[in-house]
Image (spheres, rainbow, N blue to C red):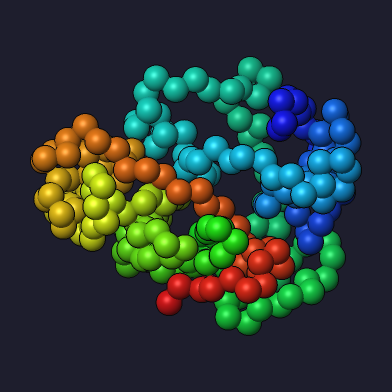
Amino acid sequence: MDGITLTFGVSGKLLKNTLLMFDYETESLWPVISGEAITGIMKGERLKEVVSSQKISWQEWFNAHPNSKALSYYGQESPGFDNYMDYHTSWIKTGIFPVENRDPRLKPKTTIIGLNIDGQQKAYPLDLFKSRTIITDRFGGLPLLIYHDNSTNNTIVYKARAGKHASNFNMSNERDIVVDSVTGSKWNLKTGDAIEGKLKGKRLEMVDFKNAYWFIWAEYYPDTAVYK
């Protein structure tokens, strides 16, 4: 940030029931959901996000990216436990502090795919994917292809463009493979790569998103739209 490499830690503080990071260099506070400093000399600065898939199983990731490096937990594959399991499995618990913006459009603990594009927000409930794998939409001036696999929890948001052209994408008869309406090329939803057709070798551009509980997203972004 401004030529300074920041080193982050956990502040022990919460804002709207979400973790606040701090950086050792300036001691500014940064909410993880927005990445924008709220105190300190960095106030108003926003961290640049690395666009990726979120919360995916190691097996699913490794199958798609076999040359990946893995960060171990003290030499172990994983900690082996989750201190927040009761919280995640409860439809009632919504954090330590009362929720100020209880938006009734969705149940508080509904998990959503949240987009924040040019100051506009939109939420896509994961319940929409019970009977489908993809949703195509247009938001924030972008054509979107939203992919979610319920069996692996893999979620990725792409710009819905085949080459330079906005395109519709339709599921093929093959698992996790879509076909674009512009060139008829086949695309692997797990990697975004065109695997067959005129655009073979090209890759769809990913769009940043958050997987979050609805009550958290609505607290930070009360004017968000909800996809129906």
Residue 112: percent from left, percent from top: 53, 63
Q: Number of marks in the image?
A: 0
Q: Please name whichever residue, 174 or 76, is drawn nearer the observer in this view of the structure.
A: 174
Which quadrant is the C terminus positioned in? bottom left
Residue 166: percent from left, percent from top: 27, 56
Q: Residue at x 85, y 28 (%)?
A: 25
Residue 81: percent from left, percent from top: 66, 39
Q: Is residue 155 above or below residue 116?
A: above
Q: Please name whichever residue, 143 or 191, is drawn nearer the observer in this view of the structure.
A: 143
Q: Residue at x 28, y 51 (%)?
A: 161
Q: Is residue 108 above or below residue 56?
A: below
Residue 185: percent from left, percent from top: 14, 46
Q: Residue at x 71, y 77 (%)?
A: 102
Q: Residue furthest bottom?
A: 104
Instruction: For residue 61, say whether it is visible.
Output: yes
In the image, taking residue 208 as reference, residue 184 lies left or right, namely: left
Q: Please name whichever residue, 188 or 4, is drawn nearer the observer in this view of the structure.
A: 4
In the image, taking residue 94 as reference, residue 57 lies left or right, namely: left
Q: Residue furthest front?
A: 2
Q: Is residue 131 above or below residue 206?
A: below
Instruction: For residue 109, say whether it is visible.
Output: no
Which quadrant is the N terminus positioned in? top right
Q: Residue at x 61, y 30 (%)?
A: 78
In the image, taking residue 108 as reference, residue 61 lies left or right, namely: left
Please tell me in which quadrant of the rendered image residue 50 appears. top right
In the image, taking residue 66 as reference, residue 44 lies left or right, namely: right
